Amino acid sequence: MDYHQEILRILTEADSNGLSVKKIAKHVYNACNSLFAPISYDSVYKAVMQDLLSNARKPNSLIVRTEKRGTYRINTENPLSSQLLLQFKAHEEEEKNTIEMEKEMPLSLFDDVMPTHD
């Protein structure tokens, strides 16, 4: 299974310090595992580690290693990474606006629906 898109999503949410392979693998496992299509953590960890290693070696990759061993982050010098970060920020703002609208209009499905028996 290809976890590359999920890895990019997780790293865009992380700060500039990056995340360890273990944390990235846990996030990918939690995002991709389901009751009807279970996957083993070991296979996810191996696939994530292989993806990170192979992509970090490429010169213009979106993923780079940090100074700390086993930690990866988004390559901020790559022009495509700025587009990823902008898309993530736009999505965050959209979610905040939706939450604010829900707070302003606290309508419930069950308000005034129950008939009264007199």
Image: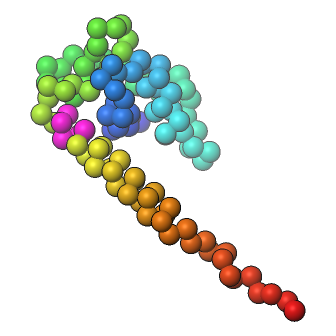
Name the residue: 53% across, 36% down: 30
Residue 86 position, x and y percent, is 22, 43
Above/below status of 110 relative to 77: below
Q: Which residues are magenta?
A: 81-85
Above/below status of 115 relative to 12: below
Residue 73 position, x and y percent, is 30, 23
Quadrant placement of the C terminus: bottom right
Please state the total of marks drawn on the protein image. Answer: 0
Residue 43 position, x and y percent, is 49, 25
Give the farthest residue toward the right.
118
Above/below status of 91 relative to 1: below
Residue 24 position, x and y percent, is 43, 26
Quadrant placement of the N terminus: top left
Instruction: Determine if residue 52 is in view.
Output: no
Residue nearest the viewer, comparing 54 with 71: 71
Q: Main secondary structure of the magenta part?
A: helix
Left or right: where 44 falls relative to 83: right
Name the residue: 50% across, 69% down: 105
Instruction: Determine if residue 18 is in view.
Output: yes
Name the residue: 30% across, 23% down: 16
Quarter of the image where one finds residue 84: top left
Left or right: where 28 falls relative to 69: right
Name the residue: 30% across, 43% down: 88
Quarter of the image where one finds residue 70: top left
